[in-house]
Image (cartoon, grey):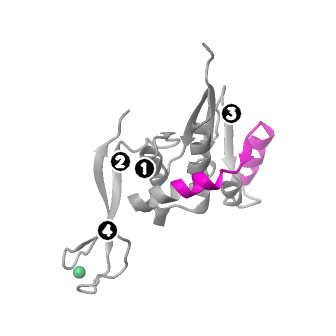
């Protein structure tokens, strides 16, 4: 049996963590959106360039996958917390998950990326922090009158109090 080729899709949080990224026996890929989130000139940018010299590749996801990941993020409420680069990371991983003989893992410390990844049945791994263990859904609760909202609003339509975002655990991740 052929050993599956391991591919890590790397998000912005990893490049900005300040920790060196040493992964052997795997291909590292990120997206152009992620590379544009790294400010030129700084230390993170220099290590990003160094990683590219060592083989880090930059690829773009398909439009269809972007659409599908966006739809999931809208359902979970993570859409408000994901940049277009974050969505690209998810969509690129989704593209790779359909290829044969490839094991694709999203490397990210972003809880919203991890949450959407889990819903989309994509494998993720935390980099500096332990990943999430429960799948969650965002909802919004008024600290004034207690009314709950399923969509992101900033001011309560009942009493005018500023709304708080609450992370609601919905199920344990299957590991
Ligand atoms: Zn209220």
Q: Quadrant of the N terminus?
A: top right
Cα distance between the residues tagged 3 and 1 = 23 Å
Point out the residue furthest to the left here: 145
Q: Where on the image, by quarter, is ligand 1? A: bottom left
Mark 4 or mark 3: which is in front? 4
Farthest residue to the front: give it. 64
Image quadrant where one finds the C terminus: top left
* Whether label 1 touches label 2, CB < 8 Å: yes
Q: CA distance from mark 1 to mark 2?
A: 6 Å
Q: Is residue 137 left or right of residue 40?
A: left
Front residue of 42 and 171: 171
How far is disc 4 from disc 3 in space, using C-alphas? 39 Å
Sequence-wise first label, 3 or 1 = 3
**Can residue 146 be seen here?**
yes
Residue 37, relative to residue 159: is it above or below? Answer: above
* Residue at the spot 32% in from the left edge and 71% down from the top edge: 164
Helix, strand or loop at mark 3: strand
Nearer-N-terminus badge (3/2):
3
Q: What residue span does the magenta drawing correspond to?
A: 45-68
> Which residue lies under the disc numbered 2?
135
* Residue at x 52% of width, y 54% of height: 69
Residue 69, compared with residue 19, is above or below; it is: below
Q: CA distance from mark 4 to mark 1?
A: 17 Å
Which is more N-terminal, label 1 or label 4?
Answer: 1
Do labels 4 and 1 touch, CB within 8 Å? no
Q: Which mark is residue 115?
A: 1
Return the residue at label 4. Answer: 150
| Mark positioned earlier in the residue sequence (1 or 2) | 1
Q: In this rendering, which labeled residue sits more in front, label 4 or label 2?
A: 4
Q: Position of residue 25 (x, y in %)?
A: 66, 25
Q: Would residue 7 appear left or right of 81 to someone viewing this image?
A: right
CA–CA distance in space, label 4 to label 2: 16 Å
């Amino acid at each position: 049996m052929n050993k599956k080729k391991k591919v890590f899709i790397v998000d912005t949080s990893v490049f900005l963590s300040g920790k060196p990224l040493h992964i052997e026996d795997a291909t590292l890929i990120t997206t152009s959106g992620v590379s544009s989130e790294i400010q030129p000139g700084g230390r993170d940018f220099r290590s990003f360039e160094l990683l590219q010299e060592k083989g880090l590749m930059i690829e773009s996801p398909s439009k269809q996958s972007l659409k599908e990941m966006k739809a999931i993020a809208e359902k979970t409420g993570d859409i408000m917390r994901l940049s277009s680069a974050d969505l690209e990371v998810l969509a690129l991983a989704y593209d790779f998950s359909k290829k044969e003989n490839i094991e694709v893992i999203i490397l990210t410390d972003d809880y919203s990326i991890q949450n959407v990844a889990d819903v989309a049945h994509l494998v993720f791994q935390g980099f500096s922090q332990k990943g999430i263990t429960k799948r969650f859904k965002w909802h919004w609760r008024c600290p004034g009158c207690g009314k709950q909202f399923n969509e992101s609003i900033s001011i309560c339509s009942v009493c005018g109090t500023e709304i708080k975002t609450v992370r609601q655990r919905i199920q344990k991740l299957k590991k």
